[in-house]
Amino acid sequence: MCCWARARRAGGRCLLRIEDLDTPRVVAGATERILEDLCALGLDFDGEVVVQSRDLAPYHQALAHLRASGALYACRCSRKDLARAASAPHEGEEGPPYPGTCRALGLPFDDPALPVAWRFRVPAGAVTVDDALQGRFTQDVQAEVGDFVVRRKDALIAYQLAVVVDDARQGVTEVVRGRDLLSSAPRQVQLFRALGAPPPRFAHVPLLVDDTGARLAKRSADAPALVRDLLASGLTGARVLGLMGHALGVCDQGARLDAAALALRLDEAPLRRAFVRWPCGAGAGD
């Protein structure tokens, strides 16, 4: 909703992408349910819906470019190897930084007898992202993350590379997503530069949490925020949007809004927070 609202307020285009490259975790029918839920809320999108798994060629072309430029190397490290090498005092929010074990080994990329991940050689120096909502965020990717994986040992394309390739080919000028992905932005800026593409602007919106402060996600056992669950409980799309607006502090409790009306109220002020608390017990009787 926040992405749609920012695009519509600015008179821009809002693009929808289904990121389904992690095939072992893809749930059958999930794409259709997502599209149905968005439609029920009155959200429309511009251009063709991009489904990543339908065309892998752009990702392999990007990998070939990075490999030819010397920006990648093969890594045989297992999770167990990395756990043994980890040093707790230096561990970041995504785990310990990769120690560069395989950086200088010159391992083959395509030896069937030696499954390897492909890692990006992180350039030295801090990267600063001026986020439209969360402010300035600076990270020394080499020190805090280390060389990161862009192609997994099972040959699947990693998230960090996939979204950069898609943002570049779709001409995305602003990426709007949850605040939990703010720390990914510096890595992606480095990949944009390595691929010769201009980085987009970023806007990271607040995370939805329950009364205990725990993040609500689709895999949360007690998540009341799933649109499908709320609609199935008897709420209309306008009432669900009213709940969102109330959680963000832009409308009264019990409000009913269409998507356009909520978009008009969602300027940057209510989205600058780190977290938004979802009203417990929201349902048909709310």
Image: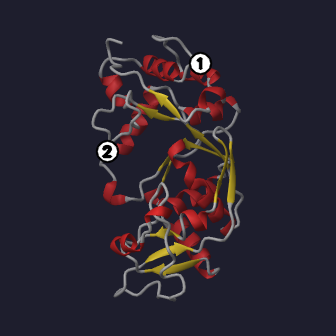
Does residue 29 lie above or below 222 as drawn?
below
Residue 283 in view (yes/no):
yes
Q: Position of residue 247 (x, y in %)?
A: 49, 22
User: Could you tell me if the residues under marks 1 and 2 are in contact, i.e. CB atoms within 8 Å?
Assistant: no
What whole-number distance in Å separates the C-alpha atoms at marks 1 and 2?
A: 30 Å
Mark 2: amino acid: Gly
Residue 82 occupies quadrant:
bottom left
Does residue 168 lie above or below 230 as drawn?
below
Does residue 96 lie above or below 45 as drawn?
below
Q: Nearer the viewer, residue 248 or 27?
A: 248
* Residue beneath disc 1: 261
* Residue beneath disc 2: 29
- Disc number at residue 141? none
Residues packed near mark 2 inside 10 Å, few (<14), some (14 to 19) or many (20 plus) = few
The secondary structure type at the circle numbered 2 is loop
Q: Which colouring convention does the figure follow?
A: secondary structure
Q: Position of residue 171 (x, y in %)?
A: 66, 52
Q: Nearer the viewer, residue 151 or 29?
A: 151
